[in-house]
Amino acid sequence: MAIETGKTRAAFPAGFEDLNDLPAVLDRSGALVIMDFYTKLTLAGHCFQVRLGKITTPVTGDGTAITDTAAEIAIDAPAASVLIPLYGEISVDTWTADDGEANFQSVGVVSSAGTAFTPLPLLMNGDAASLTTARAAATGAVTVTADAVTTTRQHARWHAQEGAAEADENVNSSDATYKWYPRQGADLFLPGPSCLYLQVALWTYMAHIDYAEVTAASLGL
């Protein structure tokens, strides 16, 4: 009976052609090397970031409350592609006297208006996004499909009561940053056409979304 063997590698060259038979990769202790799916997506150049605002120039959220078709960031995936949310963050710069709120949502229709944003590769000096597109604009200037309980998926939401401020609520400084970890629930996959978007009202803030793009065929969808 044949014994299965692997090859030790100090480095892991890329570029093998499809359908070639290759030995399993072992480290020098003889342990099998298994790469996390999300690590592989990053190393393969499939992961990107869309951001809005910066430390020296925070931006302002939408009007006096969230409007269901008004977003700050939207990431669109066309048909035959899949958008995979990885992380979302909102860092509040200035609290307001009125209710402040924010949420991450997705829907099966791409956004329709707003300033285009070129997604930043999370693999430094990596290739540009080839499947997804994005928009980013303050004060709710990105247009998305109207929120509906029958079609829109809500992923994370925050709301600060009217008149509340960080000092008033006796919270620590970390509470000025709202973080969304998509994998805390079921892994989230958004086959296109789809749109992942962020809405923010009132606060001045900075925000970003990290995500991956892949073809639907690569996931068997």
Image: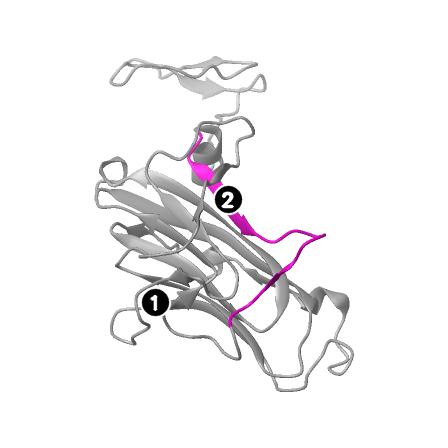
Does residue 160 lie above or below 190 as drawn?
A: below
Q: CA distance from mark 1 to mark 2?
A: 21 Å
Does residue 98 lie above or below 176 as drawn?
A: below
Quadrant assignment for the N terminus: top left
- Residue at image position (57%, 57%) is 89
Q: Residue 133: x percent and y percent?
A: 37, 44
Residue marked by disc 2:
49
Q: Residue 53: x percent and y percent?
A: 61, 54
57 is within the stretch colored magenta: yes
73 or 22: nearer the eye? 73
Q: Is residue 214 left or right of residue 126?
A: left
Residue marked by disc 1:
153
84 or 91: nearer the eye? 91
Does residue 95 lie above or below 51 as drawn?
A: below
Q: Residue 166: x percent and y percent?
A: 73, 76
- Residue at image position (71%, 64%) is 174
Estimate how packed mark 1 is, as few (under 14), some (14 to 19) or many (20 or more) residues with alpha carbons within 10 Å.
some
Residue range in magenta is 45-62
- Residue at image position (52%, 56%) is 88
Q: Which mark is residue 99?
A: none
Type of residue at label 1?
Answer: Arg
- Residue at image position (52%, 13%) is 9
Label 1: element kind: strand
Q: Is residue 133 left or right of residue 1?
A: right
* Foreground: disc 1 or disc 2: 2
